[in-house]
Amino acid sequence: MENMLPVAGNGLLDRRTFLRGGAALAAVMTGYTVARPAAAAPLADEPWSLAPGAISPAYEKRSRFEEKVARTLSNPKGETRTSHARTPHHLINGSFTPNGLHFTIVHSGTPDIDPDRHRLVIHGLVKRPLAFSLDALGRYPMVSRMTFVECGGNSAPLFSPEPVQASVQALHGLASCAEWTGVMLSSLLEECGVEPKARWLIAEGADSLALSRSVPLGKALDDAMVALYQNGERLMPGNGYPMRLLLPGWEGNMNVKYLRRIKLVEQPAMSYYEARTYSQILPGGKAYKFYFVQEVKSFVTHPSPGLKLNGPGFYEVSGIAYSGNGRISKVMVSADGGRSWAQAALQEPVLSKAFTRFRVPWRWDGGPAVLQSRAWDEAGYAQPTRAQFVAVRGEASSVPPVTAFPNQHFNSITSWAVDGKGEVRHVYA
Amino acid sequence: MSMHKRLPVLLLALGFAAPSAGETPGLGQPVSESEIRAWDISILPDGSGLPPGSGTPAQGARIYAQKCVACHGENGKGGPFAPVVGGGPLTSINSVKTIANFWAQATTVFDFIRRAMPWQQPRTLTNDEVYALTAYILAQNKLIGDNAVMNAETLPKVRMPNRDGFIVRFPDRM
């Protein structure tokens, strides 16, 4: 079994190990579970095997044993401030986020929109201002695409000068991935007839603060969508029901929810969220503006803090990688804090601007290890090391609360230290 | 690039008449700018979109005391929610961004007050009230004089201190 030889330090194995000889190895794998039964008992039928089960509900919910798999809420009592609900990346698997676990951020609560009364108006520098009902949009040719949405402030605790001890959900939970179905914005703009002078559009929601963001016309005509469906069902209220702007790969806040108005204009509006919130101060005191793209990023989800390793042996190191610049081309994984690297297997299909699940088999010897992942995208960008990132973007002046946003667009490497007991901690390496 | 661009070919193959290039379902309902007016609250930094009306810092102070002070504190110095007056130099990547030390355009102040304030009753202020509150906040921040009148002419001309403090991150995407 030549392919069981480590390909990188601390026991990382060839990514094809399980593809070639999986069954034998799977039998000796141990998982991230807390405990195993103390002793083997004779097999017997359980009660659920001895009586008919429940009726099928019209809309099925997951098993009652899965209720702990939930988003964490930054504002559970709905106080007058922004509410964040974060995706539990360490408790799910695959590449797509179930609708009930997709992250949401709402700044003034979730509006209760009657879809029959909702309208999308497109006006400004167009030949024909038009209003579209949800019924009308439902008759347009639709497209489906898998794409991630990520808050510009996702991973912000990693700007801390010391590693903040928190789960992958707390650190990276403001990114999720879904299949979105809707009408290409270019189709609607074509029907309205964009005037040659138009360079930007201002997208605005029907929420109480009428959240608005400016979007360059080039993006609008490229791959922007008015999304109506999320993973096959209508958008969830927290994701913009009944319609949202979808700008694949671009800062989450620009994907305006509850979309009710698009105005074509010559210059950006410099709305509150682009002029203040989503402009980022740099170490010299200047600030970035128009940080549209969510750049290449990856992190390990299994194992991660809260998922204890249950004794030495075989594990699968896995995580997600994504880039707002296209497809993921490569993910490397290290178990020795970046001294040596093994190439991860990428789950097919690898889609542009979507989560890509990566996996590497690992034979943990029970000693200390530091797990990292680093991704590259097809546009040629590499996820920066922490040193590279901090040299350009700086660090916060003190350790912030885990829910704070000291800055934005953090996309450097995350490091998890595994100790001899199998506990996982966040470290800088 | 997208599926619908290939649709005419598919329809032709199925024996339907091919739509002409650029044809769409045509289900958008024509609306006039007068019908849109109540929704059209967009304002650009050059002042386009600013409505008629005007206000002064003194007028704004009275409205502020009624409708804003509970959240933003006496003299705009902050209460349960963010201050609208003051702000130190930008010395760290997590320095607090304020109107005075960060915002590049005064029009953003008017725009955000009109669309989102007061938080529990958005879009209930008159345009004169929004101009007055904008004037009050700018004057408290020493960005305009105490007797300045803010209107569609004067507001876009207010020079914000951090106007030139920004670097466009992705100029090739604009």
Image (spheres, coloured by chain):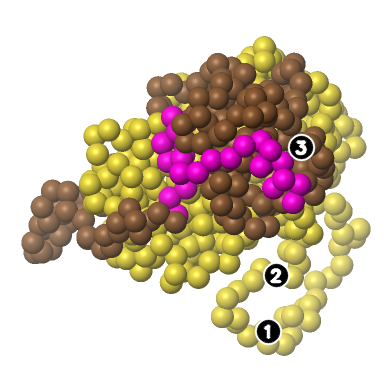
Chain colours: A yellow, B brown
Q: Please state the horizontal and vertical placement of residue B76, each as a whole percent of the image.
A: 76, 37
Badge 1: chain ID: A
- The numbered disc on residue A53 is 1
**What amino acid is labelled 2 in the image?**
Ser
The quadrant holding residue A154 is top right
- The numbered disc on residue A272 is none
Residue B89 showing in the rendered view = yes
Of label 1 and label 2, which has the lower sequence position?
1
**What amino acid is labelled 3 in the image?**
Gly
Q: Please state the horizontal and vertical placement of residue A295, each as a whole percent of the image.
A: 54, 29
- Give me the residue at 74% from left, 51% from top: B66
The nearer-to-camera label among 3 and 1 is: 3
- Please report the bounds of the magenta region as a residue range: B39-66
- Give me the residue at 43% from left, 21% from top: B171
- Answer yes or no: are tags 2 and 3 on the same subunit: no
Q: Would you say A190 lies left or right of B139 here?
A: left
Residue, disc 2: A63
Q: How many marks?
A: 3
Q: Is residue A415 above or below residue A192?
A: above
Quadrant in which the N terminus of chain B appears: top left
- Give me the residue at 43% from left, 72% from top: A116
Q: Please state the horizontal and vertical placement of residue A27, each as a whole percent of the image.
A: 70, 50
Q: Please state the horizontal and vertical placement of residue A122, each as a whole percent of the image.
A: 35, 51
**Is B60 covered by the magenta stretch?**
yes
Badge 3: chain ID: B
Badge 2: chain ID: A
Alpha carbon separation for disc pair 2 and 3: 51 Å
Query: Badge 1 local density, few (<14 within 10 Å), some, or many (20+)?
Result: few
Alpha carbon separation for disc pair 1 and 2: 13 Å
- Give me the residue at 38% from left, 45% from top: A263
Query: Does dot 2 land on a helix, a strand or a loop?
Result: loop
- The numbered disc on residue B76 is 3
